[in-house]
Amino acid sequence: MSDRLNLAVIIGSTREGRWAPAPAAWIAGVARQHGGFDVDLVDLLDADLPQHLSEQDMWNTESDQSAPVAALSERLHRADAFIVIAGEYNMSIPASLKHAIDYYMDEWAAKPVAMITYGGKVTGGQNAAQHLRQIFPELRTMTIRNTIAFPRFYQHFDERGQFTGFEEAEPAAKSLLDELRWWGRALADARSATPMPSPF
Ligand SMILES: Cc1cc2nc3c(=O)[nH]c(=O)nc-3n(C[C@H](O)[C@H](O)[C@H](O)COP(=O)(O)O)c2cc1C
């Protein structure tokens, strides 16, 4: 039996011309090489969640009549750990990512999440990361210590158009994945030993 954990890497931006798929593809590749994970690259643009969030949706996502809601529910349920990719939007996270977080509840519960952020400013999206640290505990999701930030990422492309920050960030990615794997294993074991109590 494989000891690998299921990792969902979530592309948080759906903006036209978004940069999010580049860091998502990079960390997905590093995670596959790491050996501790089976990786599912989740693009919220393809997930195509309805704009409308009804009162019932967050309680019935598995049997939701909307195929996109049920399909993303299944992928999030399958995950033992998450990495979210979030550019900073007005000192916070993209609306598309917040919408996907709000759409689900049990899918996120008792699992760890790591954050990879970036932005136009020198802070590298750390305001987005701090907001995620406020949001995720409400879903009973554990935000891990290690993060990766790409400040003013647009200034770091070489003459061939390759982003130079990924290679520099490889050691940080390894530490992040090691920590995520530890939490993912610990929480998977805890979930199977004892169901998490209802928050209500
Ligand atoms: C509406 C909007 C608000 C933004 N606000 C911030 C911000 O507060 N801080 C920052 O560092 N960058 C900010 N930016 C720059 C984004 O982080 C940058 O455009 C990034 O590429 C967005 O992620 P994406 O390309 O994956 O959609 C903002 C961009 C947009 C479009």
Image: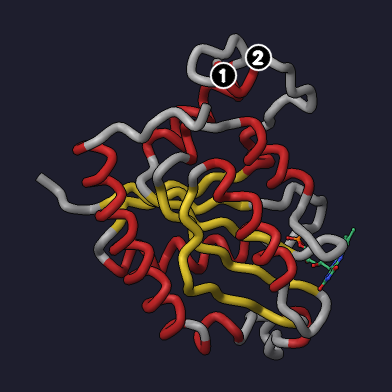
Residue lying farthest top? 65
Is 116 rendered above or below residue 161?
Answer: above
Q: Which residue is mark 2?
A: 56
Crowdedness near tag 1: few (<14), some (14–19) or many (≥20) residues, C-alpha within 10 Å: few
Left or right? Give the position of 41 relative to 78: right
The residue under the point 32% across, 54% down is: 184
Residue 59's disc number: 1
Quarter, ligand 1: bottom right
| Kind of residue sitting beneath label 1 | Trp
The residue under the point 69% across, 73% down is: 126
According to the image, what is the colour scheme of the structure?
Answer: secondary structure
- Which residue is nearer to you in this view: 60 or 193? 193
- Which residue is nearer to you in this view: 116 or 163? 116
Label 1: state its secondary structure. helix
Label 2: state its secondary structure. loop
Is 55 rendered above or below residue 105?
Answer: above
Residue 194 image offset from top left, x and y in percent: 24, 35
Q: Quadrant of residue 119?
A: bottom right
| Kind of residue sitting beneath label 2 | Gln
Residue lying farthest right? 90
Left or right? Give the position of 91 relative to 174: right
Is 97 rendered above or below residue 200?
Answer: below
* Screen quadrant of the N terminus: top left
Crowdedness near tag 2: few (<14), some (14–19) or many (≥20) residues, C-alpha within 10 Å: few
The residue under the point 30% across, 56% down is: 37
Q: Are marks 1 and 2 in contact (CB under 8 Å)?
A: yes
Residue 176 image offset from top left, x and y in percent: 42, 72
